[in-house]
């Protein structure tokens, strides 16, 4: 092995050379070693990773201190390349330019381009503009590499809009952009949530010249990123590009997101396709059924929606109340679908029983929109349609939406027989609880109203209770001792405003009683 080659290998070994080793190496060989370390490709370096930043600093420091090498453009070029390492800094770039000015050394084109590379890693917008001005002042060329590092610097500096605009200026001007620059932009814009722009970048990349080795990874990234936030266009684009054909296989977690995205958009074809893949890999879960049903639901196909829920019911998969909220919202938004769903329910019930939750949805929506009287026929048919009596939620919905006293009385009596006295009533949303208490008070059902009220006070979901004054008045008038329990709960919750309402009712009742007693006394004396 030649002495020079042997010396280079010693300098460029993973372990830093000692000062004793460097003493035996000619200055020209050390300069050659610096040139090899600075090579961005690093293709001519010996095998083994080295810390480029620290090795450049070590060799430059040795040349200046031990060999008394004068400061030159070459020295500053080496140091500027060291700043492009993650261990470098924008302040280091600034210091080098300041030091060159003090030493009377003019910046070279290489120094400026290396500075742009460093500022792509350590963004500093002001300093980058100063470097560009220096290049313009000295008529230095800005080649493709320099322009790309300016773009990357803007990207690292979070100047996303400016970076995006400059990249497209280059593309429109037919300036070649390296594919890895597109890749970085796609990844950054995806991570930042600029998904429409990310797709535009990907389309531009597809038409750029170069190897498409990374295209599969980018499609995985786009599908994952877009489906996570239900970005429909991006999800469909990525899916149709490679996953629908089977060229790429999406992980289970990504499939879940794609299914959810298709469901929200009512894309029945995509939802059915993804559901089929999931079912071929593992056992289908409740949320898979619900997502498929949601797809048909948002497509406005009530018959197919009911079919999915029927399959769940038949397979023993419980259909939760929460799982039907999407259907409720859809029917409230588009009332024309109510009759279609009811027709599908009654047609299905001729051959098999319908999931109770679906009929409960119909009753809830009809009673909410048109009053419980309009839903009474469906309500009475629940048992024959589902094989089960109405549940507590359905009965409560009918009670709070009833518009006539007679209907309310009938429903309350039925509710009392089935549920009241059999434990605490289920806690509903504040609006429903408030309406239930109001209906109970309206018909003199103090005991039932008090049950709901005490439960609401325990829950502490709010500090305002629209029924509190009326309930306190009724309780005090009938000397219901549970009024003290109400006060205790309000005191525990430190709800002073509500507590004062009850206390005021009690004081007024006490004053009225004293007034009545006084009037009775005066009447007795007068007689």
Image: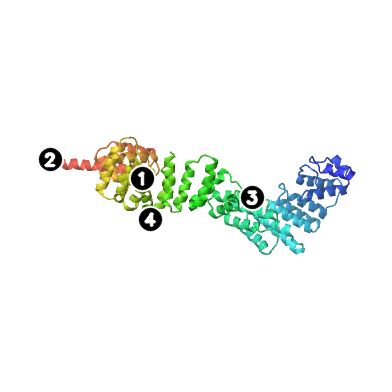
Residue occupying image coordinates x 58% and y 44% = 251
Secondary structure beneath label 1? helix
Residue identified by numbered label 2: 524
For label 3, the crowd category at 10 Å Cα-Cα, with few meaning under 14, some 14 to 19 and many 20 or more, is some
Mark pair 4, 2: CA separation: 70 Å
For label 4, the crowd category at 10 Å Cα-Cα, with few meaning under 14, some 14 to 19 and many 20 or more, is few
| First reached walking from the N terminus: tag 3 or tag 4 | 3
Mark pair 2, 1: CA separation: 73 Å
Where residue 148 appears, x then y in whole percent? 70, 57
Side of 415 where 295 appears, left or right: right
Residue identified by numbered label 4: 336
| Residue 497 found in image quarter | top left
Secondary structure beneath label 4? helix
Discs 1, 3 touching: Cβ within 8 Å: no
Residue identified by numbered label 3: 216
Look at discs 1 and 4 and give the one toward the viewer.
Answer: 1
Residue 464 visible to an observer of this rendering: no
Look at discs 2 and 3 and give the one toward the viewer.
Answer: 3
Residue identified by numbered label 1: 349
Mark pair 1, 4: CA separation: 21 Å
For label 1, the crowd category at 10 Å Cα-Cα, with few meaning under 14, some 14 to 19 and many 20 or more, is some
Secondary structure beneath label 2? helix
Side of 392 where 243 appears, left or right: right
| First reached walking from the N terminus: tag 2 or tag 3 | 3
| First reached walking from the N terminus: tag 1 or tag 3 | 3
Look at discs 1 and 3 and give the one toward the viewer.
Answer: 1
**Image quadrant occupied by the N terminus:** top right
Residue occupying image coordinates x 30% and y 36% = 482
């Amino acid at each position: 092995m030649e002495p020079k080659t042997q010396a280079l290998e010693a300098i460029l070994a993973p372990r830093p050379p000692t000062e004793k080793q460097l003493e035996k190496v000619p200055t020209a060989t050390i300069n050659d070693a610096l040139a090899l370390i600075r090579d961005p490709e690093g293709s001519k370096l010996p095998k083994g990773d080295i810390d480029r930043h620290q090795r450049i600093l070590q060799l430059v420091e040795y040349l200046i201190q031990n060999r008394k090498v004068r400061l030159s453009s070459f020295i500053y070029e080496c140091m500027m390349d060291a700043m492009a390492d993650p261990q470098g800094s924008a302040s280091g770039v600034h210091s080098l330019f300041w030091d060159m000015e003090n030493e009377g050394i003019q910046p070279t084109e290489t120094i400026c381009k290396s500075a742009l590379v460093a500022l792509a890693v350590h963004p500093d917008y002001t300093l980058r503009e100063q470097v560009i001005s220096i290049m313009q002042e000295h008529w230095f060329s800005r080649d493709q590499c320099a322009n790309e590092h300016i773009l990357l610097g803007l990207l690292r500096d979070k100047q996303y809009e400016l970076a995006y605009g400059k990249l497209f200026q280059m593309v429109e001007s037919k300036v070649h952009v390296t594919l890895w620059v597109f890749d970085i932009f796609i990844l950054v814009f995806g991570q930042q949530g600029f998904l429409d722009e990310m797709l535009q970048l990907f389309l531009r990349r597809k038409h750029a010249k170069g190897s498409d080795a990374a295209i599969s990874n980018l499609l995985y990234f786009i599908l994952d990123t877009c489906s996570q936030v239900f970005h429909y266009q991006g999800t469909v684009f990525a899916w149709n590009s490679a996953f629908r054909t089977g060229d790429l296989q999406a992980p289970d977690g990504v499939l879940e997101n794609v299914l959810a995205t298709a469901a929200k958009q009512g894309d029945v074809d995509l939802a059915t396709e993804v559901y089929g893949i999931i079912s071929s890999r593992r056992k289908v879960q409740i949320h898979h059924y619900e997502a498929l049903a949601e797809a048909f639901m948002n497509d406005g196909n009530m018959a197919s929606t009911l079919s999915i829920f029927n399959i769940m019911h038949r397979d023993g998969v419980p259909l939760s109340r929460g799982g039907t909220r999407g259907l409720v919202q859809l029917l409230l938004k588009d009332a024309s679908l109510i009759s279609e769903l009811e027709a599908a329910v009654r047609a299905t019930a001729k051959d098999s029983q319908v999931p109770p939750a679906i009929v409960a949805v119909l009753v809830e929506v009809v009673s909410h929109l048109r009053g419980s009287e309009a839903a009474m026929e469906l309500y009475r048919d629940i048992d024959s349609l589902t094989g089960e009596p109405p549940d507590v939620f359905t009965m409560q919905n009918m009670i709070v939406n009833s518009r006539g006293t007679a209907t309310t009385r009938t429903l309350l009596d039925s509710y009392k027989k089935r549920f009241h006295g059999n434990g605490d009533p289920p806690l509903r949303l504040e609006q429903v609880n408030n309406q239930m208490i109001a209906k109970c008070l309206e018909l003199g059902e103090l005991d039932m109203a008090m049950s709901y009220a005490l439960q609401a006070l325990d829950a502490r979901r709010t500090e305002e209770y629209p029924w509190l004054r009326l309930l306190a008045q009724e309780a005090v008038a009938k000397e219901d001792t549970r009024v003290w329990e109400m006060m205790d709960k309000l005191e525990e919750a430190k709800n002073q405003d509500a507590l004062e309402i009850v206390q005021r009712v009690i004081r007024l009742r006490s004053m009225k009683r004293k007034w009545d007693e006084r009037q009775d006394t005066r009447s007795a004396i007068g007689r």
